[in-house]
Image (cartoon, coloured by chain):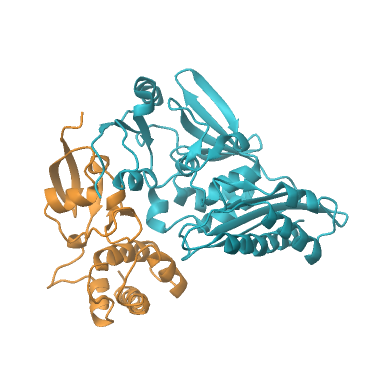
Amino acid sequence: MKPPPFDYCCPDTLDEALALLAEHGEEAKVIAGGQSLVPMLNLRALHPGVLIDINRLPGLDHISLEDGQLRVGALARHKAVLESAAVKEASPLMALAYPYVSHGPIRNRGTLCGNLCHNDPASEMPAVALASGAEMVLQSTGGSRAVAAEDFFTGTLSTAAEANEILVEVRVPRVPAGQGAGFHEVSPRKGDFAYVAVGATLQVADGACSAARIVCAGVGDGPHRARAAEDALEGSAPSEDSFRQAAAAAADSIDPNEDFHADADYRRDLVRSLTRRALADAASRCN
Amino acid sequence: MTTPRTVELVVNGESRAGEAEPRMLLSDFLREQLGLTGTHVGCEHGVCGACTVLVNGEAARSCLMLAVQAKGTEVRTIEGLGGVDDMHPLQEAFWEKHGLQCGFCTPGMLMTAVELLESTPNPSLDDIREAISSNLCRCTGYQTIVEAVQAAAERMQGEGQ
């Protein structure tokens, strides 16, 4: 279908964009890459009064590593993040997950920050952000605030960002020394939305696992952290057995949605298998 | 203002202009305002890839871009690739290897392949499959498309292009 009518502004500065957002409030939607927003417009799932195009704002396409944090700006495209050496260094989990993010033409235009704001429950990056303890820097005419990932993702296609705020940057803490990461996904075709994806990070010292993080996508109304599975691993040896037990706990912790592609039992099975594989990978990469 | 505005851009090397409401998709702008109907419109929500064009050298879904966003850009469409008398090596290879049947996906497949071969002149089979994974074809089963892209890459390498 075709999008419904809307007004369109293309400001040249962040201040101008924020002023427009303050003026239009709930009527406005911010567009960057548009790879999630335009499909929703075409399907007429959204009827914004005005689109505020931030593509011309200067200085927001950065991907940098400063003060122990990976910082990715609102206009950093998926392609640039995927290819970034800073990302590989600061967040191996993100680097492992990125090849699963959509297809080339979508990655050319889509942005990491836009993907996080869209918060599709089957999307990889909200889960990665949650596992990594990322924070979102939201800016409005009133100033800026940082919101932790666990508070940011509030439900299907919903976040804590207010209507007058722009996600200008996501900050991901640099991976602690010795942490290993694993990421596995099952989708109909590579690059399609996940049926289920699981990411895990882990430390292994003196033969014991610690500080495990296990996150799932595609299992509910947003990224899901399997805390029971993380707790099950704390202090246990990194073995096939303990990974199996943690994977079972992860599968028990979800209340998956169902559709004609994948019913709840299948998604639980996937969580079980993918968690085990992600943990095994993570343990093998601890050093 | 939802009223139309003028969009000036370069399409296939020529300066072009047309009128577009903010909601007009680049795909519709190319087809309806500029008469370039070679760009096909399939799913209109970014899944099928039939409408893929190059924007500033990068493959993009023209159904996921507003025409007003294309202002000042350089767009390449299937019409710029080659005609009946001067086909691009990719077009020749698709013809020879039966890389199409109904032809609906072909413009998007070709523009996706152009981007691949311009950045990766000697792609592996995995590179080719990864690249065209963004485009749906319901006729060929993809194998002949992969073979066509591979053949075109070899020919272009041979010609030193």
Residue at position x 51%, y 29% in the image: A138
Which sits in the foreground, A134 or A24?
A24
Q: Is residue A181 visible?
A: no
Q: Is residue A9 left or right of residue A286?
A: left
Residue at position x 32%, y 70% in the image: B137
Classify the position of the C terminus of chain B by image quarter.
bottom left
Which sits in the foreground, A190 or A27?
A27
Please count the marks in the image.
Answer: 0
Name above or below for residue A170 compared with residue A40.
Answer: above
Q: Is residue B36 visible?
A: yes
Name above or below for residue A113 compared with residue B42.
Answer: above
Where residue B34 sits in the image (x, y, percent)?
A: 12, 50
Q: Is residue A128 left or right of residue A242?
A: left
Residue sitting at the far top: A142
Where residue A167 sits in the image (x, y, percent)?
A: 48, 33
Colour displayed for chain A in the image of the structure: cyan
Where residue B159 sits in the image (x, y, percent)?
A: 29, 75
Quadrant assignment, res A105: bottom left
Which sits in the foreground, A229 or A134?
A229
Quadrant assignment, res A265: bottom right
Which sits in the foreground, A177 or A120?
A120
Classify the position of the N terminus of chain B by image quarter.
top left
Name above or below for residue B41 compared with residue A140.
Answer: below
Name above or below for residue A227 compared with residue A15.
Answer: below
Where residue A95 sits in the image (x, y, percent)?
A: 58, 53
Colour displayed for chain B in the image of the structure: orange
Residue at position x 16%, y 32% in the image: B3
